Image: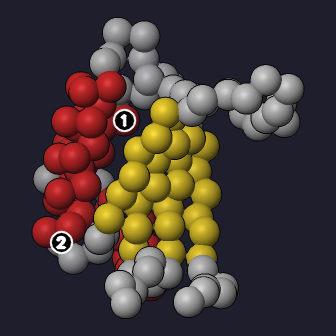
Amino acid sequence: MEKKSAALFHSLFTLNDDVSEQEFLTAFEAFYDHLVAAGFARGYRIMRRQPLEGFGKSLSEFQYHAEIEFPSLAEDQACYEYVKRSEEPIRSLHRAMNSKAKSGSADFFLEVRIGQHP
């Protein structure tokens, strides 16, 4: 059985009007690939929001949802500290990715697995 991720970092955001999904994905994948090479991340998903009529009114406005998988909360925290130091090359990769999203549109949260079946 494949071991599932123990920590998921989530981002909700909207792209700038002049940015295509492919442009964002290219910048995101460069950022993500570096996190993998540095030994932090091990998977990701990026989804486009499809609103359902009459639902989701209490949610903030966003177009996309990204999640990055980490083996544990410790790896997520280590990655957060690494990105926060803002040293090269992660600084440029992070800025290139973030420049594709509308300023002030992003919201973040972390999920930590507390149970699993099977």
Q: Looking at the image, which residue is at 67% across and 28% down?
A: 51
From the viewer's side, name the closer residue of 52 and 59: 52
What's under tag 2, amino acid-wise?
Ala
Please say if 101 is above or below 89: above
Per the image, the residue denoted by label 2 is 38
Q: Position of residue 85 (x, y in %)?
A: 32, 61
- Residue 12, by quadrant, is top right
At mark 1, the secondary structure is: helix
- Residue 74, by quadrant, is bottom left
Q: Looking at the image, which residue is at 41% across and 45% down?
A: 46
Q: Quadrant of the C terminus?
A: bottom right
28 left or right, relative to 110: left
Q: Position of residue 29 (x, y in %)?
A: 22, 46
Please say if 69 is above or below 102: below
What's under tag 1, amino acid-wise?
Asn
Does residue 81 appear anywhere in the picture? Answer: no
Q: Looking at the image, which residue is at 55% across and 28% down?
A: 63
70 left or right, relative to 115: left
Per the image, the residue denoted by label 1 is 98
At mark 2, the secondary structure is: loop
From the viewer's side, name the closer residue of 61 and 54: 54
Disc 1 packing (10 Å; few <14; some 14–19; many ≥20): some
Q: CA distance from mark 1 to mark 2?
A: 20 Å
Q: Position of residue 35 (x, y in %)?
A: 24, 63
Protein image colouring: secondary structure
Does residue 100 appear anywhere in the picture? Answer: yes
Disc 2 packing (10 Å; few <14; some 14–19; many ≥20): few
Please say if 117 is above or below 80: below
Tag 2 or tag 1, which sits nearer the N-term? 2
Q: Position of residue 6 (x, y in %)?
A: 49, 81
Q: Looking at the image, which residue is at 46% across and 55% down?
A: 67
The label shown at residue 85 is: none
